[in-house]
Image (spheres, rainbow, N blue to C red):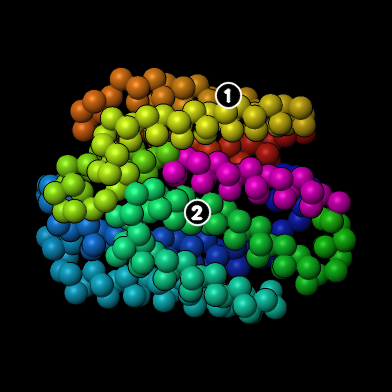
């Protein structure tokens, strides 16, 4: 994190391996999720599920195992490099929980949403976890960086919180979007159990909670003298207010589909806000 005066513990190659590992496990998760959603997606997204149309079920299953294997092997290598081999279990646990989420948890009211939100937050934490132990293995770099660990830990927790809340908010809206298919397939999501109207209220509560969190971190960065980051987050706050206003008015499936796309963009902007640290004085 050179923008904060913290040297990189991992080399560029090691960081790329970490990014590839996380990305591989994520792609595998999307594949297995689409596999278990085939029947529901014929109703929710007719013609858009590529498993069973563009690729076979057998190939999709093999691709899931391939991507998860790449992610686990990469995680095993990095854990060995930082002398914390037990951390390879994080990648194994993540791959396993993605399978169980797709097979079982995603049809449990709110539990599936929380699992996805947790895994999204975990991906941010992994970067600092491995960078920290890579620094720890270099006494000179560790000594140089140590004075900045407190602020870095806060930033990691802030972005983990942002990832968790934004993912949870989006997953709750997706449940409303996919209500009809989930209901007909017997999938007990929050929208099916509580009904779309109540699920929208719960989604609004989640969205308002996220807005309050973003306003708080915007204030935190402002008082910390990080004005560019704070200003960038002001854009995210305004976009989130717009999304909440549109969610309040939304009734049709197409409305929730558009909100889901907007939240993807908002999540991307949240990640891009980290670039602003490099321009702070």
Q: Residue at x 26, y 51 (%)?
A: 188
Q: Residue at x 60, y 27 (%)?
A: 215
Q: Residue at x 38, y 54 (%)?
A: 112
Q: Nearer the viewer, mark 1 or mark 2?
A: 2
Which quadrant of the figure has residue 253? Answer: top left
Mark 2 crowd level (few <14, some 14–19, many ≥20, 10 Å Cα):
some
Residue at label 2?
Answer: 118
Q: Earlier in the sequence, mark 1 or mark 2?
A: 2
The mark tally for this picture is 2
Q: Main secondary structure of the magenta part?
A: helix
Is 13 positioned to the left or the right of 152 in the image?
A: left
Query: Front-most of 145 and 254?
Result: 254
Tell me: residue 95, above or below residue 158.
below
Query: Front-most of 106 and 89?
Result: 106
Tell me where residue 227 appears, x and y as whole percent.
Answer: 70, 27
Queried whether the magenta region covers residue 223, the answer comes back as no
Query: Front-most of 181 and 237?
Result: 181
In which quadrant is the C terminus drawn? top right
Q: Which residues are magenta?
A: 147-168
Tell me where residue 12 appears, x and y as whole percent.
Answer: 62, 63
Tell me: residue 83, above or below residue 34.
below
Q: Would you say residue 89 is visible in this rendering?
A: yes
Q: Which mark is residue 234?
A: 1
Q: Residue at x 65, y 33 (%)?
A: 217
Tell me where residue 205 appears, x and y as whole percent.
Answer: 45, 31
Q: Would you say residue 265 is visible in this rendering?
A: no
Separation (CA) of disc 1 from disc 2: 25 Å
Tell me where residue 115 appears, x and y as whole percent.
Answer: 44, 55
Is 256 positioned to the left or the right of 22 in the image?
A: left
Is 66 positioned to the left or the right of 241 in the image?
A: left
Look at the numbered disc 2 and give the secondary structure of its residue. helix
């Amino acid at each position: 994190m050179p923008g904060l005066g913290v040297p990189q513990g991992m080399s560029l190659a090691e960081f790329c391996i970490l990014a590839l590992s996380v990305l591989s496990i994520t792609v595998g998760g999307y594949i297995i999720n689409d596999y278990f959603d085939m029947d529901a997606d014929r109703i929710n997204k007719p013609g858009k599920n590529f498993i069973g149309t563009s690729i076979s079920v057998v190939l999709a299953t093999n691709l899931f195992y391939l991507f998860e294997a790449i992610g686990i092997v990469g995680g095993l290598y990095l854990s060995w490099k930082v002398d914390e081999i037990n951390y390879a279990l994080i990648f194994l646990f993540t791959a396993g929980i993605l399978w169980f989420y797709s097979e079982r948890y995603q049809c449990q009211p709110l539990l599936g949403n929380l699992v996805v939100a947790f895994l999204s937050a975990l991906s941010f934490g992994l970067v600092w976890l491995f960078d920290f132990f890579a620094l720890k293995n270099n006494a000179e770099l560790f000594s140089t960086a140590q004075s900045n660990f407190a602020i870095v830990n806060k930033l990691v927790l802030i972005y983990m919180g942002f990832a968790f809340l934004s993912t949870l908010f989006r997953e709750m809206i997706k449940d409303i979007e996919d209500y009809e298919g989930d209901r007909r397939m017997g999938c007990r999501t929050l929208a099916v159990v509580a009904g779309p109207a109540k699920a929208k209220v719960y989604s609004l509560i989640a969205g308002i909670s996220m807005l309050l969190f973003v306003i708080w971190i915007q204030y935190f960065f402002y008082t910390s003298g990080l004005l560019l980051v704070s200003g960038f987050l002001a854009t995210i706050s305004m976009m989130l207010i717009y999304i909440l206003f549109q969610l309040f008015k939304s009734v049709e499936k197409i409305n929730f589909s558009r909100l889901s796309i907007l939240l993807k963009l908002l999540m991307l902007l949240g990640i891009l806000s980290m670039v602003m640290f490099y321009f702070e004085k």
